[in-house]
């Protein structure tokens, strides 16, 4: 399972409420060191997710999605009609943590950026410098809840973009880091413009609340309201923010002691699933334009594409594993669909099933693994072209070396290659692959171009 030898600091403190924000007392991280055990952290998160599900009825998928966002240090957007408990859900999730400031605001068109970043510093203004006093603002908060975010004017939304993505306040001459970890935004409607499109891309996770009308669900909601009067509840044990921060470092591959491994073939497979899903979404848009009158195409930005790796780590982590498996890609629909729109979820699961069956029935996962190791080998040599002047069998630290050398001996009879023989060896090894899927064929074609470019660059250096 997990190694248990790392430590971090946290203390538990009571909640303090303030107008406009809730402040959880900030703990002194140097006073006490408590061991950080991933198994225990997973249990804490599972317990928190379970409690929120008991408190917020019929929102299991959205709750899973938002906890994933927080583990990835991302943001989430919830759309629904009025009175669907968006605010209660956000507040209840934030209440599961301690040691973090929570900024809360109701957006309006009259607001200026100082609503989010703090009032102007009068002394600096007298000097002709526009500087915000960021105390108690979003900049100084780990969590944020912005209600009716599309009621904000475009100038304010534009100012928020950098804070949400780069975690910094950059306005005029002011450039300060922001402590923002995750923001949950809520809206009753979507407003489409150049600015809001950029804003939506910052909210990697999106959900649509469909009001539940079933008698049983309504009965459960009424029970919870009678018990808690529509207010969030504080659990007996909350997760210290320091634990969330450390867990998010593990998820994003930034932790020095713990890492969640993603095999090369799983990376390739996950990307193939997402790509296929994107193609299928765009095909449906063209075939049924009347169902998507305001949507020209379905676009997944490189920012969102890259988040798939973090989401895969979240899935493995919450399942108690330190290695991602191909089946984890099935739950990427949390990231690439609007949770609550059933057609999108079903299309993604169908895309996953199609690609998984292709690769499993053709035993393509093994071929992908060998091909990706070969591609990594090419990248290694590309950054060290002088290696091509030596026999490939002498290149250390590459997982492919043994397979490639054995193939060279059996096929070409090469044991100590020259530069030209290295070219023949690499090109011949690549041609030995008989692609089992279209995705592999495309990858082979691009790798062949990489080999050609590699030797062209090397010949230029040698001459």
Image: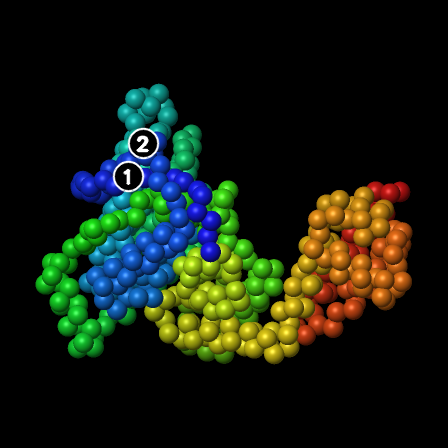
Residue 119 picture location, percent across and down:
27, 33
Decide which of 104, 73 is in the foreground and name it.
73
Q: Can residue 72 be seen? A: yes
What residue appears at the point 32 percent right and 39 percent down from the top-left corner?
10
Which of the two discs, 1 and 2, labels the residue nearer the N terminus?
1
Residue 159 picture location, percent across and down:
38, 42
Q: Which residue is mark 2?
A: 31
What residue appears at the point 24 percent right and 49 percent down from the top-left corner?
237
Q: Quadrant of residue 279?
A: bottom right
Identify the colour scheme used: rainbow
Q: Is residue 288 above or below residue 180?
A: below
Q: Quadrant of residue 89?
A: bottom left
| Labelled pair 1, 2 in contact (Cβ < 8 Å) | yes
Q: Is residue 144 left or right of residue 423?
A: left
Q: Can residue 108 be seen? A: no
Dot 2 falls on a residue whose secondary structure is loop
Q: Is residue 46 left or right of residue 87?
A: right
Decide which of 207, 100 is in the foreground and name it.
100
What residue appears at the point 21 percent right and 61 percent down from the top-left corner?
55
Dot label at residue 11: 1
Task: Classify 10 Å Cα crowding around label 1: few (below 14), some (14-19), many (20 and above).
Answer: many
């Amino acid at each position: 399972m997990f190694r248990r030898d790392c430590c971090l600091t946290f203390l538990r403190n009571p909640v303090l409420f303030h107008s406009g924000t809730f402040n959880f007392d900030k703990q002194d991280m140097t006073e006490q060191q408590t061991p950080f055990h991933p198994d225990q952290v997973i249990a804490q998160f599972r317990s928190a997710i379970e409690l929120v599900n008991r408190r917020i009825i019929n929102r299991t998928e959205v709750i899973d999605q938002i906890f994933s966002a927080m583990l990835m240090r991302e943001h989430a957007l919830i759309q629904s009609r009025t009175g669907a408990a968006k605010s209660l859900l956000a507040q209840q999730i934030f209440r599961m943590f301690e040691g973090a400031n929570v900024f809360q605001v109701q957006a309006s068109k009259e607001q200026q950026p100082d609503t989010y970043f703090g009032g102007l510093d009068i002394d600096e203004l007298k000097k002709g410098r526009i500087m915000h006093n960021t105390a108690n603002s979003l900049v100084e908060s780990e969590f944020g809840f912005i209600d009716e975010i599309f009621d904000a004017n475009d100038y304010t939304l534009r100012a928020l973009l950098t804070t949400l993505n780069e975690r910094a306040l950059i306005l005029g001459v002011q450039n300060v880091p922001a402590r923002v970890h995750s923001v949950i935004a809520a809206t009753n409607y979507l407003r489409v413009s150049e600015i809001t499109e950029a804003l939506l891309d910052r909210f990697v996770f999106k959900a649509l609340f469909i009001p539940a009308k079933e008698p049983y669900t309504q009965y459960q909601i009424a029970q919870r309201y009678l018990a808690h009067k529509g207010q969030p509840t504080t659990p007996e044990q909350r997760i210290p923010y320091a634990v969330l921060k450390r867990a998010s470092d593990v998820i994003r591959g930034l932790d020095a002691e713990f890492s969640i491994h993603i095999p090369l073939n799983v990376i390739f497979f996950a990307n193939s699933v997402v790509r296929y899903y994107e193609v299928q979404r765009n095909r449906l848009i063209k075939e049924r334009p009347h169902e998507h009158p305001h949507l020209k195409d379905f676009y997944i930005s490189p920012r969102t594409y890259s988040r798939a790796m973090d989401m895969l780590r979240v899935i493995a982590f919450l399942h108690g594993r330190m290695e991602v498996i191909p089946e984890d890609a099935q739950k990427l629909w949390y990231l690439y669909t609007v949770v609550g729109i059933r057609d999108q979820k079903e299309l993604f699961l169908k895309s996953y099933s199609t690609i998984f069956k292709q690769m499993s029935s053709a035993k393509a996962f093994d071929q992908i693994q060998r091909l990706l190791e070969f591609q990594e080998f090419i990248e290694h040599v590309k950054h060290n072209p002088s290696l091509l002047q030596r026999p490939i069998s002498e290149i250390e630290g590459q997982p492919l070396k043994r397979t490639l050398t054995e193939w060279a001996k059996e096929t070409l009879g090469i044991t100590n290659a020259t530069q030209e023989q290295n070219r023949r060896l690499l090109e011949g090894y690549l041609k030995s692959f008989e692609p089992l899927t279209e995705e592999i064929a495309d990858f082979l074609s691009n790798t062949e171009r990489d080999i050609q470019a590699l030797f062209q660059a090397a010949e230029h250096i040698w001459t």
